[in-house]
Amino acid sequence: MTELRSEVAQSMSLDQVRYSQVWEDHMLLEQGLQIRPDDDVLSITSAGDNALALLLQEPRSVTAIDMNPSQNALLELKTEAIRQLEHEEFATLVGVRDSYDRSALYKRIRDQLSEGARSFWDAHDEDLEAGLIHRGRLEGYIGGFAREHLPELWAPDLLQRLMDAENLKAQASLFESEGLTDAFEERFRWYFGREMMAQHGRDPAQFEHVEGGDVGSYFLERFHWACTHTRLAKNFYLEFFLSGQYRDLESSPCFLRPSNFTRLRRLLSRLRIVTGELEQLPAGSYSKANLSDIFEYMTPELNHAVFELLSQRLRPGGRIAWWNLLVPRSVPEDLQGTLHPLNELSNRLWREDRSWFYRAFHVAQRTAL
């Protein structure tokens, strides 16, 4: 697995927060993994949202793992803020409320952070001041479309009317008649095309295994689908994508909801944050795993090796879940006797995906030897 570090980590900067939000629908993980009280769950950290969402399912433990220490520093800051601040203060530090001085809030929790996380945030005070949720590389890129381009393309009240539409049919009709103009389509395809995204949103290394295709048209097709098949008023992923904010925190990511705050604080003792790679995890340590979209950054050979590792180390009866964005990656055929794809469940859940970016969602189950 040392190849994973050389292939991805050496070609991408790991000294910045690449994602300050998770753009993968937690409900798919909850339904696909079916967390139970005796589960020990592994989750790619990213921004930590889904690690915390899975923690709220009350398994025995959750381990958040990431090769990027900056992402783990973000999750550690969130968890310490949940432990020590009140909800309104926490929401301010995260960046969805403006009721308090963020620097003062950080100083209150700073000494409880690990040395690595403390050093990172001491050097990124501008990110703290701006609000964490807006400061990932991807979020800055996405936010640029909402701030700099959408006002030129949509009437000032169109988003509000879409959010307030009486039903899905009315929303879809309004979107297609007023939102999906020729000018909007052209700008959207350009802004979310491969060149722009590699330069400003993701990283050129993340496109290494993407073969051909019009990336901008793909994202436009998926966005069109989302705006005509999911209610914007109930889809916080779309709401933030289009507005950069959440109107109602009870309809926002799980870790931000006031109704979850006290319970989440109580459960934090079950969370462990690890900077490293999957190979360092002991065999049989985990029964469920959220693997984000890590497979599409790997060569087919490394992809096979990681699936083989998972088939050996996941407990019998355990499940893994992951997404495909631009590169199709599934369990290799020669491993499907041990790591069985749950295709019907996977396809059904993907059709309910509110995050809309992804071309596939996968769940596989470890069989008994």
Image (spheres, rainbow, N blue to C red):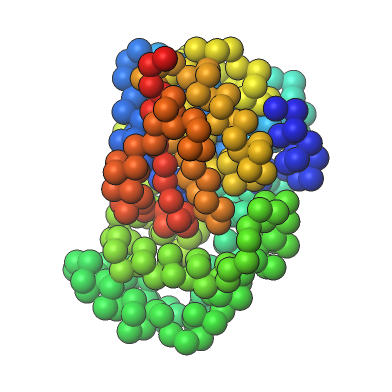
- Image quarter for residue 168? bottom left
The location of residue 309, given as percent across then percent down, is: 58, 24
- Quadrant placement of the C terminus: top left
User: Which residue is at a point 19% across and 68% down the rendered structure image?
Assistant: 166
User: Which residue is at a point 34% across and 76% down the rendered structure image?
Assistant: 175
All told, the count of numbered labels is 0
Q: Is the residue 209 above or below the residue 170 in the image?
A: above
Q: Nearer the viewer, residue 109 or 20?
A: 20
Q: Nearer the viewer, residue 133 or 324?
A: 324
The location of residue 16, given as percent across then percent down, is: 73, 43
Q: Is the residue 98 above or below the residue 114 in the image?
A: below
- Residue sitting farthest toward the front: 334
* Residue 246 can be seen in this image: no
Left or right of residue 332: residue 190: right
Q: Is the residue 192 above or below the residue 286 in the image?
A: below
Q: Nearer the viewer, residue 126 or 280?
A: 280
User: Which residue is at a point 53% across and 25% down the rendered structure image?
Assistant: 310
- Image quarter for residue 188? bottom right
The location of residue 104, given as percent across then percent down, is: 64, 34
* Residue 36 can be seen in this image: yes
- Quadrant placement of the N terminus: top right
The location of residue 217, given as percent across then percent down, is: 52, 72
User: Which residue is at a point 71% across and 34% down the rendered structure image?
Assistant: 4
Q: Nearer the viewer, residue 122 or 291?
A: 291
